Image: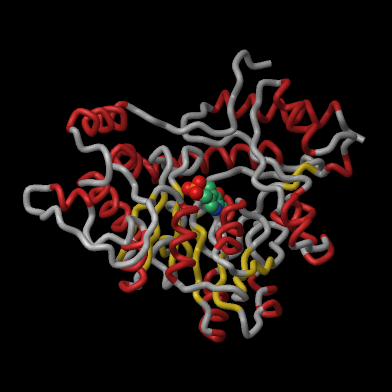
């Protein structure tokens, strides 16, 4: 057994990130300023979006986007149950009603073919989530959205660097929202970015992210600025800091290399686990795309074992292997069971995955020895608990 604990994810922070943060601290300008502008510009250019708005998190991005779209009481938003809580929480906190559509069994992405039957006159938007960094099937989704005049908001928290049919996520005709939480493909500590081609929406979100103030603080206090400002609307406090952007500036150029490394490890797992009847491995979508491999999420076929998924994760821990849970399906969480119950029969694939899924260690700094330890531990746990 390996001597040290292997977490399921840990960020790659190197000297350039550290030096840039120290530079911000020494400069006296630590909040929103020139480094945020640099990171915004670099990220916007990388994904190919006309506008990008840096924020404190993807959750803030979802919040401001839904508010800017004037989502109100009774509006229905279609999304997937296989996502992080905030996708659905923000819909509810804006007064909207989430409508959950089941996932595909292989990719765990929203099943676009099942969206149409959930569209009603009150439907306003669709929020697909590019699960684990693999693009949803966007062409038929956009066709539906055009037919019913719906806005598409991509939850791209897993999808920095993901491509769909040769196009980067962030450049499609939609609003896309990225996360830079430490577990994501690149990090700013905490942080997020909204990307869009809609100039008015970008302006509205920019205004709302900082008190509804007519100009940003760093411009006001710079030599060229004036200290006067106006409040154009009540706003939030969701601005990214230079300290955060300092990290992002040096993460972004490494993103493609990070993804290559993640893919190598994921494909190693795939080849080692092929034919293991107790696992259902993640499947590639049939269309052309670039998977960013944010997560490696096999399903544990618990019907073939004497233990459930949670016990399986505990057993891995005894072998010094960490794992994550992405995700227990939304409708299986306590609040949703009580306030918006959905029977498992309505969401069969999500319900099935919810009780079997786990995330194995996958991050660029992992060595092939680490990956071998993971494979060995998984196979040992299976052997010891086979039915
Ligand atoms: C991480 C994540 C979020 C939230 O991102 P934050 O930056 O932590 O707010 C939203 N949706 C999905 C699918 C995520 O994985």
Quadrant assignment, res 308: top right
> Does residue 281 appear left or right of residue 277 in this picture?
left
Q: Which residue is drawn at 71% across and 65% down?
A: 102
Give the left or right position of residue 347, taking residue 119 as reference: right
Hey, which residue is sitting farthest top in the picture?
3
**Residue 219 locus on image (x, y percent):** 16, 52
Q: Who's the residue at 15% across and 57% down the image? A: 228
Q: Quadrant of the C terminus?
A: top right
Q: Which colour scheme is used?
A: secondary structure
Location of residue 212 in the rendering, given as x and y in whole percent from the top left corner: 32, 61
Q: Can you name the residue that lies furthest to the left here?
A: 223
- Residue drawn at (90%, 34%) of the image: 306
Q: Is residue 40 left or right of residue 98?
A: left
345 or 207: nearer the eye?
207
Residue 171 percent across, percent down from the top left: 38, 65
Q: In this view, does 113 lie to the left or right of 42?
A: right
Closest to the observer, 30 or 384: 30
- Seen in the picture, residue 333 relative to 302 is either above or below; the reply is below
**Quarter of the rendering occupied by the N terminus:** top right
- Residue at position x 76%, y 52% in the image: 332
Q: Return the x and y of residue 363 as percentages of the image width and height.
A: 51, 35
Quadrant for residue 92, please give it: bottom right
Q: In the image, is residue 108 above or below residue 114?
A: above
Count the labels in the image.
0
**Residue 150 higher or lower than 245, as above or below:** below
């Amino acid at each position: 057994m390996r001597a040290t604990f292997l977490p399921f994810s840990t960020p790659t922070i190197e000297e350039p990130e550290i030096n840039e943060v120290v530079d911000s601290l020494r400069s006296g300008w630590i909040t929103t300023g020139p480094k945020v502008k640099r990171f915004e510009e670099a990220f916007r250019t990388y994904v190919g979006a006309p506008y990008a708005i840096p924020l404190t998190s993807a959750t803030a991005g979802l919040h401001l986007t839904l508010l800017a779209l004037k989502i109100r009481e009774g509006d229905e938003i279609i999304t997937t149950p296989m996502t992080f809580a905030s996708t659905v929480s923000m819909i509810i906190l804006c007064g909207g009603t989430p409508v959950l559509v089941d996932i595909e069994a292989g990719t765990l992405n929203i099943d676009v073919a099942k969206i149409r039957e959930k569209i009603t006159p009150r439907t306003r938007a669709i929020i697909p989530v590019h699960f684990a960094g693999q693009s949803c099937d966007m062409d038929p989704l956009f066709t539906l959205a055009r037919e019913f005049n719906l806005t598409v908001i991509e939850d791209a928290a897993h999808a920095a660097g993901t491509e769909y049919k040769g196009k980067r996520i962030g450049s499609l005709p939609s609003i896309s929202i990225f996360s830079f939480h430490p577990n994501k493909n690149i990090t700013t500590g905490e942080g997020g970015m909204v990307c869009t081609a809609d100039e008015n929406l970008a302006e509205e979100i920019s205004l709302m992210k900082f008190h509804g103030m007519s100009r940003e603080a760093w411009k006001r206090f710079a030599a060229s600025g004036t200290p006067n400002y106006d409040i154009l609307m009540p706003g939030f406090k969701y601005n990214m800091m230079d300290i955060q952007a300092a990290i992002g500036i040096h993460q972004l150029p490494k993103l493609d290399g990070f993804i290559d490394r993640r893919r190598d490890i994921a494909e190693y797992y795939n080849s080692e686990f092929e034919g293991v009847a107790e696992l259902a491995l993640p499947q590639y979508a049939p269309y052309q795309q670039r998977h960013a491999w944010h997560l490696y999420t096999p399903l544990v076929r618990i019907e073939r074992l004497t233990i459930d998924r949670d016990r399986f994760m505990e057993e891995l821990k005894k072998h010094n292997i960490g794992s994550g849970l992405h995700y227990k399906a939304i409708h299986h969480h306590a609040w949703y069971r009580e306030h918006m119950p959905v029977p498992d029969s309505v969401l069969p694939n999500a319900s099935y995955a919810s009780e079997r899924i786990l995330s194995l260690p996958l991050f660029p700094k992992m060595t092939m020895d680490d990956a071998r330890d993971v494979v060995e531990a998984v196979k040992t746990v299976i052997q010891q608990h086979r039915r």
